[in-house]
């Protein structure tokens, strides 16, 4: 007879996490069983991967869209497609949350991750602008962050103030959000009032300690060979330590917005969370590292009804409200 503390074939299921999390962890399987990702230059291969991921993401989003009343409008900002999401009973208080979705930089879209944007709008009460940036390898890291900036600049041209704007990214979208804000600072464009990074991919070099020590701890994340191919599609090897590709290597001594970093202790990306926290904290930036026992990559979305996920979203709401003056 098995117990919650015994080993699952691919992941430990600790009794120190909620029942909802334990149940989810027991469903996970070895990501190495997934078909390999294409080489960076195999555009036809990437289109197939993206079509598969789009269908899967759309299916995952569907119950969220039914559960939370919302309105959504397709538009563009600065020539970049976006989805303008507003929660039930939204009233315009001038505050906006810009969202950059995850997907290892090579998968998903604003449409297939709409459920995440809707949950963010519902939990925070904010208007959410989900940026539908071009995926790698059809765009590279510098073009992708430029698209995020173009959308933010277009909002500003419409009268939106940066002091009333925050940015939120999950997984690779967290790395993209941090890169875009860093680039805005370096270009003298100002910075948003706050930034939230959930399970962010902050170092595409895979050099952090937990990239090795936790490699088999979180089967919900991509296998090493998938991450390596995704990183190659996102940026040429010689650019992997460019702070606009891997923000953990950035210089934060000249400032950065108040930052909330959330993640789980099973995440292979955990080293990146800690290193980013240390870089910001050492530079005197207001930063909070909010970690959760036994949680997997992007757990607030993957296990949305778990107490851990609910707590994380509540802390995100409080953080954003504090720094947006709500």
Image: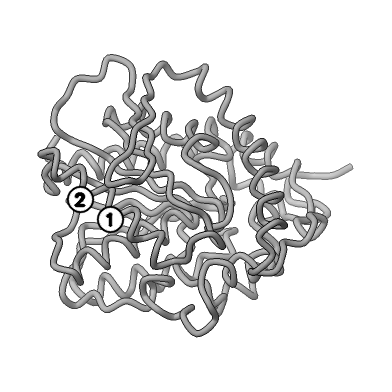
Query: Residues at badges 1 and 2 in contact (C-beta under 8 Å)?
Result: yes
Display colour scheme: one colour
In this image, 240 relative to 290: left or right?
right
Question: In the picture shown, does residue 217 fall above or below 193?
Answer: below
- Residue sitting at 34 percent across and 68 percent down? 277
Asked whether 12 or 210 is in front, the reply is 210
Circle 1 residues within 10 Å: few <14, some 14–19, many ≥20: many
- Residue sitting at 58 percent across and 24 percent down? 62
The quarter holding residue 159 reads: top left
* Residue 180 screen position, x and y as percent: 31, 61
- Secondary structure beneath dot 1 equals helix
Q: Which residue is mark 2?
A: 153
In this image, 219 relative to 177: left or right?
right
Residue 23 visible in the snapshot: yes
Count of numbered labels shown in the rendering: 2
- Residue sitting at 33 percent across and 42 percent down? 315
* Residue 215 screen position, x and y as percent: 67, 68
The quarter holding residue 57 reads: top right
Asked whether 300 or 206 is in front, the reply is 206
* Residue 43 screen position, x and y as percent: 66, 60
State the CA–CA distance, disc 1 to disc 2. 6 Å
- Secondary structure beneath dot 2 equals helix
Q: Which residue is mark 1?
A: 149
Q: Point out which mark residue 217 bears.
A: none
Circle 2 residues within 10 Å: few <14, some 14–19, many ≥20: some
Residue 263 visible in the snapshot: no
- Residue sitting at 32 percent across and 25 percent down? 86
The quarter of the rendered structure image containing the N terminus is top right
Asked whether 302 or 74 is in front, the reply is 74
């Amino acid at each position: 007879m098995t117990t919650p503390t015994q080993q699952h074939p691919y992941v430990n299921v600790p009794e120190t996490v909620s029942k909802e999390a334990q149940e989810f962890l027991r469903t996970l399987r070895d990501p190495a069983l997934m078909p390999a990702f294409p080489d960076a230059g195999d555009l036809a291969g990437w289109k197939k991967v993206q079509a598969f991921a789009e269908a899967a993401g759309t299916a995952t989003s569907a119950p969220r869209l039914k559960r939370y009343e919302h309105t959504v409008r397709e538009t563009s900002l600065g020539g970049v497609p976006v989805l303008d999401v507003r929660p039930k009973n939204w009233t315009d208080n001038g505050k906006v949350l810009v969202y950059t979705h995850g997907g290892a930089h090579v998968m998903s879209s604003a449409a297939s991750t709409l459920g995440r944007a809707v949950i963010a709008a519902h939990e925070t009460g904010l208007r959410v602008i989900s940026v539908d940036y071009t995926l790698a390898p059809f765009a590279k890291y510098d073009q992708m962050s430029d698209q995020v900036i173009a959308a933010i600049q277009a909002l500003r041209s419409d009268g939106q103030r940066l002091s009333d704007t925050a940015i939120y990214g999950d997984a690779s979208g967290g790395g993209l959000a941090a890169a875009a804000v860093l680039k805005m600072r370096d270009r003298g464009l100002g910075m948003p009032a706050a930034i939230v990074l959930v399970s962010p991919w902050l170092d595409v070099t895979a050099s952090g300690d937990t990239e090795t020590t936790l490699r088999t701890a979180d089967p919900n994340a991509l296998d090493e060979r998938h991450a390596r191919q995704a990183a190659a599609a996102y940026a040429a090897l010689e650019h992997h330590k460019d702070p606009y590709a891997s923000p953990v290597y950035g210089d934060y001594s000249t400032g950065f917005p108040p930052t909330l970093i959330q993640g789980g202790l099973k995440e292979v990306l955990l080293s990146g969370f800690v290193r980013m926290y240390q870089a910001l904290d050492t530079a005197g930036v207001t930063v909070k590292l909010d970690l959760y026992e036994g949680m997997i990559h992007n757990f607030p979305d993957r296990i949305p009804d778990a107490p851990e996920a609910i707590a994380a979203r509540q802390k995100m709401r409080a953080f954003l409200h504090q720094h947006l003056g709500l």
